[in-house]
């Protein structure tokens, strides 16, 4: 039995001694074929819609069509921001991400949205009659629709950016005011 143990130990030592542990498994193989070229250009897009007014005639809903020369992918995400305030003396815009809840004298009002590959639907929802609202809540909104690539953000346990923060999103996707496309 002792001889069998010594023989097995000798085989293991010889086998391990002939191995290399420098990270190489053998001679390098030939280089593989070149992969397909990646997409050039920016990965996120910003579209601006101005003078938006909600009313009873449009059922407090607005359909914002994406530009026809833009193709959104099924994996893309859409973010919508409303310009809530502008501080002229500081040249500072205050953007809020939708959905957004307002507490009015009449009850709770929610600005929200949904989207398809071709458009974004903005709508108001409330626990009271929307006809009671004044122009402060319904007239002259400016919205920015930001389309970001979903394949980058989906499935992460911790996103690297706060999507409620318009400026953080613009910075993360390397977007500036020059990237904003006005849509009429």
Image (cartoon, helix red, strand yellow):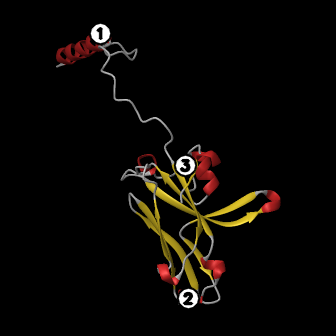
Vertically, is 99 above or below 181? below
| As drawn, 9 above or below 37 | above
Residue tagged by mark 2? Answer: 131
Where in the figure is residue 178, as x and y percent of width and height?
62, 45
User: How many angstroms separate mark 1 from mark 3 (CA)?
Assistant: 47 Å
User: Which residue is found at the position 56% from the left and 81% from the top?
Assistant: 109
Q: Which one is closest to the eye, mark 2 or mark 3?
A: 2
CA gap between label 2 and label 3 equals 41 Å
Q: What number is the disc on residue 18?
A: 1
Label 3, on which residue? Answer: 160
| Residue at image location 62% in from the left, 82% down from the top | 103
Between 160 and 110, the one lying in front of the other is 110
Q: Dot 1 lies on which element?
A: loop
Residue 5 can be seen, yes or no: yes
Question: Counting residues from the N terminus, which is met first, the one under dot 2 or under dot 1?
Answer: 1
Where residue 77 sits: x, y (%)?
Answer: 45, 55
Q: Please state the horizontal and vertical placement of residue 131, each as a whole percent of the image.
A: 55, 88
Viewer-side residue, 153 vs 128: 128
């Amino acid at each position: 039995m002792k001889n069998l143990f010594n023989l097995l130990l000798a085989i293991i030592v010889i086998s391990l001694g002939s191995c290399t542990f420098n990270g190489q498994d053998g001679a390098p193989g030939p280089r593989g074929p070149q992969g397909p070229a990646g997409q050039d250009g920016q990965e996120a897009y910003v579209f601006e819609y101005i003078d938006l007014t909600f009313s009873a005639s449009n059922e407090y809903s607005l359909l914002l069509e994406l530009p026809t020369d833009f193709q959104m992918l099924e994996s893309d995400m859409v973010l919508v921001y409303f310009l809530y305030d502008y501080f002229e003396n500081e040249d500072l815009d205050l953007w809020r991400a939708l959905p957004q809840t307002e507490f009015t004298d009449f009850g709770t009002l929610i600005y929200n949205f949904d989207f398809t590959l071709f458009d974004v639907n903005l709508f108001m929802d409330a626990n009271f009659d929307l006809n009671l609202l004044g122009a402060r809540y319904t007239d002259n909104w400016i919205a920015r629709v930001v389309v970001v690539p979903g394949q980058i953000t989906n499935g992460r346990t911790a996103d690297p950016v706060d999507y409620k923060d318009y400026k953080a999103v613009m910075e993360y996707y390397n977007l500036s005011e020059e990237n904003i496309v006005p849509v009429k």
